[in-house]
């Protein structure tokens, strides 16, 4: 650099540490204009942009807090509804069990009634059949007794009225003795 100053005219070379005053003035004026332009146009816009971002962020945080509060409230409502639904389901289940037990008892009672009715009908039928068989046996025993008596006595007991009377007497005597032959003392 010293060679550059020496080539210019041989003047005494300026001190490189001390700046030239014209450059300082021009630089200061340019700096002032730059600061004025930045202060007047750029910084207010940057400040407005920063403020808008801050408001957006703070608004977003507030909206997030509100949304979180609503979500917590909805979650609590959901839990309450779930607990109520579980309680209701338990009640319904208990009622269903009680209904099932009642239906089972009713079905058992009906089955017992039907069984008793069938047994009663069977007994009635057996009694009716027994009575029919007893009548048929009495008639047969009566006929056999009349035939036997006719052979023993030697006379004909063909007369129907007499036959019936004899049979009825014979059966009455059998009924009085409990089904055992009546001992009349005769042989």
Image (cartoon, rainbow, N blue to C red):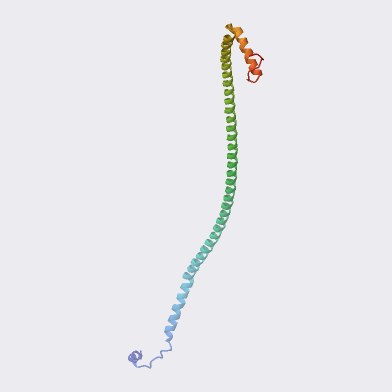
Residue 70 in the image: state x and y as whole percent.
Answer: 56, 56
126 shown above or below 6: above
Q: Quadrant of the C terminus?
A: top right
Give the residue at x 58% y 21%: 130
Residue 32 appears left or right of 134: left
Residue 78 appears left or right of 176: left
The residue lying toward the viewer, choosing from 165 and 35, is: 165
Residue 147 in the image: state x and y as whole percent.
Answer: 56, 11
Give the residue at x 65% y 16%: 173
Residue 31 image-quadrant placement: bottom left
141 shown above or below 17: above
The residue lying toward the viewer, choosing from 38 and 91, is: 91
Residue 119 in the image: state x and y as whole percent.
Answer: 58, 28
Residue 182 image-quadrant placement: top right
- Furthest toward the left, the residue is 7
6 shown above or below 181: below
Q: Quadrant of the N terminus?
A: bottom left
Give the residue at x 43% y 80%: 27
The residue lying toward the viewer, choosing from 79 and 21, is: 79
174 shown above or below 150: below
Give the residue at x 62% y 15%: 171
Residue 94 in the image: state x and y as whole percent.
Answer: 59, 44
The residue lying toward the viewer, choosing from 162 and 75, is: 162
| Count of picture labels | 0
């Amino acid at each position: 650099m010293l060679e550059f100053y020496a080539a210019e005219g041989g003047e005494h070379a300026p001190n490189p540490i001390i700046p030239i005053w014209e450059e300082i003035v021009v630089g200061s004026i340019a700096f002032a204009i730059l600061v004025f332009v930045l202060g007047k146009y750029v910084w207010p816009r940057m400040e407005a942009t920063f403020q808008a971002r801050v408001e957006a962020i703070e608004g977003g945080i507030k909206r997030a807090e509100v949304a979180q509060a609503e979500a917590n409230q909805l979650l609590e409502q959901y839990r309450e509804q779930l607990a109520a639904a579980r309680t209701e389901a338990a009640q319904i289940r208990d009622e269903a069990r009680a209904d099932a037990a009642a239906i089972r008892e009713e079905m058992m009672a009906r089955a017992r009634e039907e069984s008793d009715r069938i047994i009663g009908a069977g007994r009635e039928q057996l009694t009716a059949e027994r009575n029919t068989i007893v009548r048929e046996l009495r008639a047969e025993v009566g006929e056999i007794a009349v035939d036997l008596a006719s052979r023993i006595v030697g006379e004909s007991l063909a007369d129907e009225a007499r036959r019936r009377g004899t049979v009825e007497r014979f059966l009455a005597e059998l009924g009085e003795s409990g089904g055992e032959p009546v001992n009349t003392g005769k042989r």
